[in-house]
Image (cartoon, grey):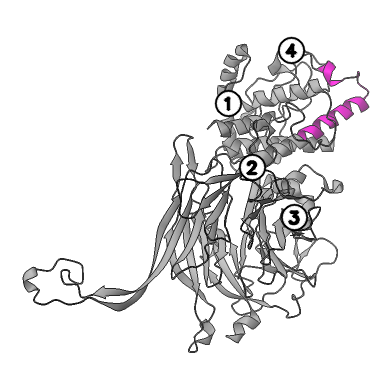
Amino acid sequence: MEAQKEAQRIMTMSVWKLYHSRLQRGGLRLHRSLQLSLVMRSARELYLSAKLEEAEAGGEAPCTPEQSADPGQPPPEERAAPADCAAAPGATEPMETQESGGEPALAPASPGKRPARGVSLPGAGKGSRKRRSSSLDKPGAAEAGLAPSKKARLEEEAEGERQPQGQDGPFPSLAKVLQHQFAGRLRSGPAKGPDPPTPGCRPGDGAVLNILVRAVVAF
Amino acid sequence: VGCPLGEEAVDWCLYQLNGAAQFEVSEADIISTVEFNHTGELLATGDKGGRVVIFQREPESKNEPYSQGEYNVYSTFQSHEPEFDYLKSLEIEEKINKIKWLPQQNAAHSLLSTNDKTIKLWKITERDKRPEGYNLKDEEGKLKDLSTVTSLQVPVLKPMDLMVEVTPRRIFANGHTYHVNSISVNSDCETYMSADDLRINLWHLAITDRSFNIVDIKPANMEDLTEVITASEFHPHHCNLFVYSSSKGSLRLCDMRASALCDKHSKLFEEPEDPSNRSFFSEIISSVSDVKFSHSGRYMLTRDYLTVKVWDLNMETKPIETYQVHDYLRSKLCSLYENDCIFDKFECAWNGSDSVIMTGAYNNFFRMFDRNTKRDVTLEASRESSKPRAILKPRRVCVGGKRRKDDISVDSLDFTKKILHTAWHPTENIIAIAATNNLYIFQDKVNSEMH
């Protein structure tokens, strides 16, 4: 459980850093983006495997990732974690990870509850969301948080437009990417443990990397 | 720990300190690179504001024996300015990433300086004479009234106050899509290379409109990107050999005679990861931030986040020596990730005889490792602890257990005070340490007393 929380915290931190690295003078740095993505991937893998173990240990209905991901769901609403498979589809929050720090998208979803999209920060006064990592305590975090909220809404609209097309624009939102990423992972099965040495042998693994790097290369 | 190094027992003392007191620091003044020239007579520093400051060592003087070895400001110039790439909507920082001196071939000195995108060749010349006695112009250069000119005179060269002139002789632009992290001058003195995250280019010093790409690790599909180039250097003697390091902790030695494109390495130096040390941050901390050939050319020195390693060119499987710089940080990687310190890129340096290696750490500490005696020492570059001519006292970080007086605990370390850039004089025991905006020059006590 501790490992899971830690992994989640690290994931959140990484996304926040990725977002903010875009605003740095000198532009997005490839090496930094790569490192952040690698950490996020490690944390994500640990988180998912911890979740899976917990689900199995908890003696819940055998909840394989394949089962929990209802193929009938529209992509943006696929769940982030296999736990709570008893919960109704659509109960999980989509992963709006632009919001700085306070993203509880990966928290076990309260069954039946569907928090509004595009809203994130505890600072914004939404009581249903728990405070997450200490990065929120950073000076300026609240200030920084205002920007992501706005951005999330804009991207919400963009996302809404794009959904019918079913394809990402040249700069798909980070949230959408992560959703797809998690969906991909769930479909492909539980995390296997340490990375196989060969790079790129798991399709869909580098989705975030893909997006960031595409943003760099697109220029 | 804490013992003097080597049989000659080097005692370091502060020789000089340049830079404003800490509370006045502006970001532009932060030193971003330090480099001695090949004789050690000149020392160049670059800063975040795009400026280069060159110091020159005063020659030995019988009249003032104590001023020998003092590095005085020789020249200051603005090397790079901030630029804006309109096509990509990106600002290009003016921060000087690296300076490399060219071997001196005539009276002038030359150096290469680079920011993220553009490399420049600067020529530094001295002028200590000027012609006087022109026929048509007066002393200020104004045209004379011809009616006042009654006879012809031959202008003569008269001595004047030394003036150091710096001119940009070449600008090597548009060679890099990604951020340039290193440059290295070839031993042939005609070519040099520049490396960015994914590519390495070979330039001729006299040709600016084209360069040869010699390494390209950009994958066909950027989704498959797993590692980037972090540093590179030419071999000091073999003009066909160079090494580059990666973010995965590996080194690749390449031979330019083998093929035009050196994507395929001649040798791959890689140490298998210790599975017991695996964490979220294993990949980040294994990234090599600096690589330096020894003066002999037989060894390579690499720095990753927690260690420095010495590699023998003849052994690819693992380094021959590994030194822990600050292993006590291993349990704090998460906090260091949070405050971004885990991304800090420390440099490393050899001494002139390749017997001692040096690298920086936090809290304005820097570390030296004697390869022969296996002793190491931690010293501090700070105003408080360095009185001029007083011997630097070794510092110690205590990690629990017995705590001695003057020990500093891990939690009291100031992570904002980091020593990323250090340089060692090519032949003598003189070191230059950049601590934020301050440049410390330490000398061997014995060395300084002799003069």
Magenta stretch bounds:
A43-68
Circle on res. B306: 3
Residue A103 percent location from the top left of the image:
69, 30
* First of labels 4, 1 by sequence position: 4
Quadrant position of residue A205: top right
According to the picture, the residue beneath numbered tag 4 turns out to be A73
Label 4 marks a residue whose chain is A
Q: Amino acid at mark 4?
A: Gln
Q: Amino acid at mark 1?
A: Phe
Closer to the camera in the image, A4 or B156? B156
According to the picture, the residue beneath numbered tag 2 turns out to be A32
Main secondary-structure element of the magenta-colored stretch: helix
Image quarter of the N terminus of chain B: bottom right
Circle on res. A150: none
Quadrant position of residue A80: top right
At label 2, counting other C-alpha atoms closer than 10 Å, the crowd grade (few under 14, some 14-19, many 20 or more) is some
**A15 left or right of B32?**
right
Residue B61 percent location from the top left of the image:
49, 85
* First of labels 4, 2 by sequence position: 2
Spatial CA distance of label 4 from label 2 is: 35 Å
Disc 2 with disc 1 on a shared chain: yes
Spatial CA distance of label 4 from label 1 is: 24 Å
Q: Are marks 2 and 1 in contact (CB under 8 Å)?
A: no
Circle on res. A171: 1
Q: Is residue A60 magenta?
A: yes
Vertical placement of residue B378 versus A141, above or below: below
Mark 4 vs mark 3: give the one in front: 3
In the displayed orientation, state which residue is furthest to the bottom: B63
